[in-house]
Amino acid sequence: MSKDIKFDAGEVFTRISTAKLVIVGDVMLDEFVSGQVERISPEAPVPIMSRTRSSVMPGGAANVARNLCHLGAQVTLIGVTGRDLAASRLKDAIENEPGIQFRAIADAKRPTTVKTRFTAAGQQILRVDDEDTAEIEGGILDRILNASEKAIARADALVLSDYNKGIIHRKVAAALIDMARNAGIPVLVDPKKTDPGIYAGASIITPNLGELRQMTGQTLTSKDEIARAAQDLAATHGLARYWLPWGQEE
């Protein structure tokens, strides 16, 4: 049976610098290509860019891990990559970051998610996404859950970093939230799904205003409307009922 825990959101953020966190979600590689545009292609009405520089950095859930470890947290990052060059580049980029242990689950049937942004004169002119957003299943799903269960047993909190790329779906979210509650730790969710019920039982979810409007089906133009919608959402789906000073029960 899962453990009910008192929840204090402020405690989560003030103690994050000493926390051991598990992040499960959609890892990706962000690639940035910059150059100069001096003419239009004769083949089609599109600019021709001369590449001058390119760089990569961890993206998606990997960027969340990067930001948290820069705040001092120790992070175990669990996500799915392909068996490709992009996976190697992502692992190399993460190895340059302090405090992240990357538990990559390689799936030969899907590519590593890559977002490539092309910029000229300070303006982004194109973004190309390489991805497979099908929900993970079968053996890859089992490996994600097994790795997560081991990491959660030693963690202070679980973060679900959902970019809607197939890793955090209903079955995964329910299993992970249940693991965390059984372990007596909070679950923080950065959501992308329009159905908040997928994250039922989490401690905190952090939709932006557009995502909250989609979740509730309301226009939400005033602060009072936003507050009521958030309170109703929390009550309906059992959110923010639980806390713990990092795993300690009453």
Image: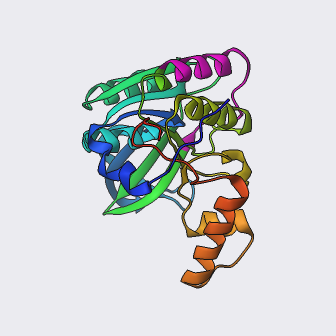
Residue 215 higher or lower than 192, as above or below: below
In the image, residue 24 lies at what x, y percent? 52, 33
Considering every residue shown, the one lying at the far front of the view is 250
Please indicate whether residue 13 sits to the left or right of residue 213 in the image.
Answer: left
Quadrant of the image containing the N terminus: top right
The mark total stands at: 0
Q: Residue at x 41, y 21 (%)?
A: 88
**To which quarter of the image does residue 210 belong?**
bottom right
Residue 212 higher or lower than 175, as above or below: below
Along the viewing direction, whichever of 35 and 80 lies nearer the viewer: 80
Q: Residue at x 57, y 57 (%)?
A: 44
- Is any atom of residue 84 visible in this view? no
Q: Is residue 95 magenta?
A: no
Along the viewing direction, whichever of 225 and 41 lies nearer the viewer: 225
- Is any atom of residue 42 visible in this view? yes
In the image, residue 249 lies at what x, y percent? 47, 38
Residue 216 higher or lower than 28, as above or below: below
Region rendered in magenta: 129-150
Along the viewing direction, whichever of 23 and 52 lies nearer the viewer: 23
In the image, residue 123 lies at what x, y percent? 37, 64
